[in-house]
Image (cartoon, rainbow, N blue to C red):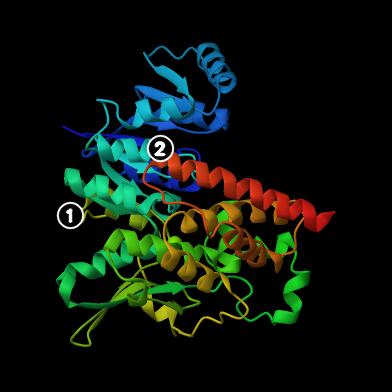
Amino acid sequence: MTQGLCILGSTGSIGQNCLRVVDCLPDRFHVGALSAGKNIDALAAQILKHNPKIVVVSTAEYRDQLRDRLKRGGYGRRIKITFGVEGQVEAATHDAVSFVVSASHGTTGLVATYRAVCAGKRVGLANKETLVVAGEIVMRAAAERGIEVLPIDSEHCAVHQCLRSGQGREVKRIILTASGGPFLRTPLKKFDAITVEQALKHPIWRMGGRITIDSATLVNKGLEIIEAHWLFGAAPSQIDVVIHPESIIHSMVEFIDGSVMAQLGVPDMRIPIQYALTYPDRVATTEKGLGLDLIAAGKLHFGRPDTRRFPSLDLAREALAHGGIMPCVLNAADEIAVEAFMNKRLRFSAIPRLIEEVMRQMSGYGPTNSLEDVLAGDREARDRAARVIRDISA
Ligand code: MG
C-alpha cells in the first residue's frame, strides 16, 4: 500500500519539486492532500493530475474560486475543499495522510505542522521557520510520540546523512556550508546601494523571494544554525558556518576522532526531498540531471564568513543564546524587513539593523510555553518591526 502524502505549500518551489519526486515513486506514494495559498491556477492543475482527497487554500474566497474552476473543468471526483489554518490542520492530520511535507511560506504552516506531529504523522520539514520559532515545542512533541522529523533543507539533509556514520556522543561539530550569496565579495561601503534586482540574483539556487534575500544577507544561514540546534540537539558552540561558493558540499559533520563526513551532490532540491520521503531507504532516481560530475566541478573553495558585512550570523547566535521568544523575534523582524526592502522602503544594509533593534526592544519578553505564546510574540515582533520602518521613513 502506498503512503498518502500531504504537501503544505504545494504550489511553491519545494511543493512543485516534491510532486515531481512523487511522480517517480508511484509504488511508494500517492497525494492525499494539497495545501496552497492563492495560486488557484497551479493548484487546480495539481488537483487534476494527482486527485487528492482534500485541498486547502488561504481564504473562503479562494475556496469558492477553486470550486468554480473545478466545476467548469468538469472535475468529477469527490474532493473536499477547505481554507485557512483549520483547513491546513484537517489536511495534515487527515486519515488519508501518513507523511506531511511542510513547505509553506514563513509561519503559515506552523500550527498544521505541529498538529501533524501530534497526530503521529511523519514530517518532512522544508519550512525552517517551524523550528526557528517553535523548535522546543515541536521537537518535544515529536520526541514524546517517537516521530521522526526529517529535514528537507539541503544543509540539514546533508547533516542528517553525515550523522549516520557515527553515534551522537562521537560528534564534535556540525559544519553548515553557505554559498555566501551574491554579495560574498561586495565591499561593505557598497551595501547601502544594493538593489532588489541585485539581491534577487542568487548564484546557485532558484528559490522564493524571501529566502533569496535571506541568502544574500546570510539571515538564512543564521536561521539554519537555529534549525540545526533543534533538529540535532547540538549546542550552538558545536555549529559552525563555512563559506563554500560552489554549493557542492551541502554540509559536514566532524567526529571526535578528526574524521569529517561530507555530503556532496548537485544543488537540486529533488535530492533532499526524495531522501526525506524514502528514509531510511535510498531509492534509485529516474530523474535526469541529478548526477554529480566532480571533474566538471573542478575546484571547491572554503572561507570564513565575514560577520562585519553579514552581522545576521551573530544575531542568530544571540537569539539562540537568549532563548525563549528571541529566535521568533529575529525571524518575524526579518520577514517584515525583507518585505520593506523588496518594496524599496528599506535599504539592504538596514535589514540586520532593524532585526537588532526589534530584538533589543523585546529582550524582556516573557517565556514561551505554548504555540499561542509564540504566535503572540510573533505578532508583536512584526508590529514593532513595522513601526520602526515607519519611523525611519518618516
Ligand atoms: Mg538551506
Q: Nearer the viewer, residue 77 or 115?
A: 115
Q: Amino acid at mark 2?
A: Val
Q: Which residue does the numbered mark 1 point to in the structure image?
A: 280
Q: Position of residue 314 (x, y in %)?
A: 51, 74
Q: Quadrant of residue 254?
A: bottom left
For residue 119, the mark is: none
Q: Amino acid at mark 1?
A: Pro
Would you say residue 111 is visible in this rendering? yes
Query: Which image quarter holds the C terminus?
Result: bottom right
Residue lying furthest bottom:
258
Residue 358 position by quadrant: bottom right
Callout in the foreground (1, 2): 2
Q: Is residue 266 left or right of residue 63?
A: left
> Ligand 1, what quadrant?
bottom left
Q: Is residue 91 left or right of residue 383?
A: left
User: Which residue is drawn at the image coordinates 55% and 68% (left, top)?
Assistant: 218
Foreground: 116 or 141? 141
Which circle's residue, 1 or 2, is located before the other in the chain? 2
Q: Which mark is residue 111?
A: 2
Residue 151 drawn at (x, y percent) = 33, 55
Comparing 142 with 123, the one in front is 142
Q: Which is nearer the eye, 381 or 128?
A: 381
Q: How many residues crowd mark 2 within 10 Å: few (<14), some (14–19), many (20+)?
A: many
User: SS at mark 1?
Assistant: loop
Q: Quadrant of residue 61?
A: top right
Mark 2: which secondary structure? helix
Determine the residue positioned at 49% across, 58% down.
326
